[in-house]
Amino acid sequence: MGLKALALNCTLKATGTSSTQKMLDLILKSLKAHGIEGTSVRMAALDIKPGVTSDEREGDDWPGDRYSERKESAAELEKRVNLKSAV
């Protein structure tokens, strides 16, 4: 199993063009050249509840997207949150 990267796009816009995404695309492309698989997630497109625990309440998207605990592939996550892959 090779290295994987998860880029968190914290732009304020849930949809549309994002300069942050353009930058992340360049970074992920550079990582791919070194054999590192990567994807990005636009945080504004998720329902992330405020708080300090790992699961704030029902409907909190954060626990399902915690990279270290996720059991789904980057492609599955991308499909689930309906985001365009950078690589």
Image (tube, rainbow, N blue to C red):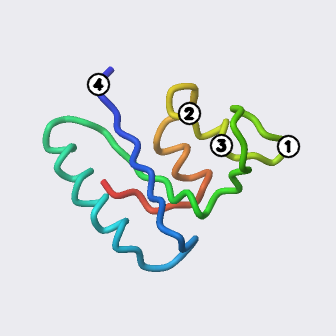
The residue that disc 2 covers is 72
Q: Amino acid at mark 2?
A: Glu
Foreground residue among 71 and 13: 13
The residue that disc 1 covers is 58
To which quarter of the image does residue 34 belong? top left
Foreground residue among 64 and 19: 19
The residue that disc 3 covers is 62
Judged from the image, the secondary structure of the residue bearing numbered disc 4 is: loop
Q: Is residue 48 left or right of residue 2?
A: right
Measure how far apart labels 3 and 2 are at the Cα level.
14 Å
Q: Amino acid at mark 4?
A: Gly
Instruction: Specify few, some or many for label 2: CA neighbours under 10 Å numbering under 14, 14-19, or 20 or more.
Output: few
Q: Answer yes or no: do the residues labelled 3 and 2 have beta carbons within 8 Å?
A: no
To which quarter of the image does residue 31 belong? top left
Q: Is residue 52 above or below residue 11?
A: above
Q: Is residue 7 left or right of residue 30?
A: right
Instruction: Specify few, some or many for label 1: CA neighbours under 10 Å numbering under 14, 14-19, or 20 or more.
Output: few
The earlier-in-sequence mark between 1 and 2 is 1
Measure how far apart labels 4 and 2 are at the Cα level.
15 Å
The earlier-in-sequence mark between 3 and 2 is 3
Which residue is located at x 31 percent, y 58 percent?
A: 24
The residue that disc 4 covers is 2
Foreground residue among 1 and 55: 55
Measure how far apart labels 1 and 2 are at the Cα level.
20 Å
From the image, state whether disc 4 or disc 3 is nearer to you: 3
Q: Is residue 7 above or below residue 19?
A: above
Q: Position of residue 77 (x, y in %)?
A: 55, 45
Q: Is residue 75 above or below residue 84?
A: above
Q: Answer yes or no: do the residues labelled 4 and 3 have beta carbons within 8 Å?
A: no
Instruction: Specify few, some or many for label 4: CA neighbours under 10 Å numbering under 14, 14-19, or 20 or more.
Output: few
Measure how far apart labels 3 and 1 are at the Cα level.
11 Å
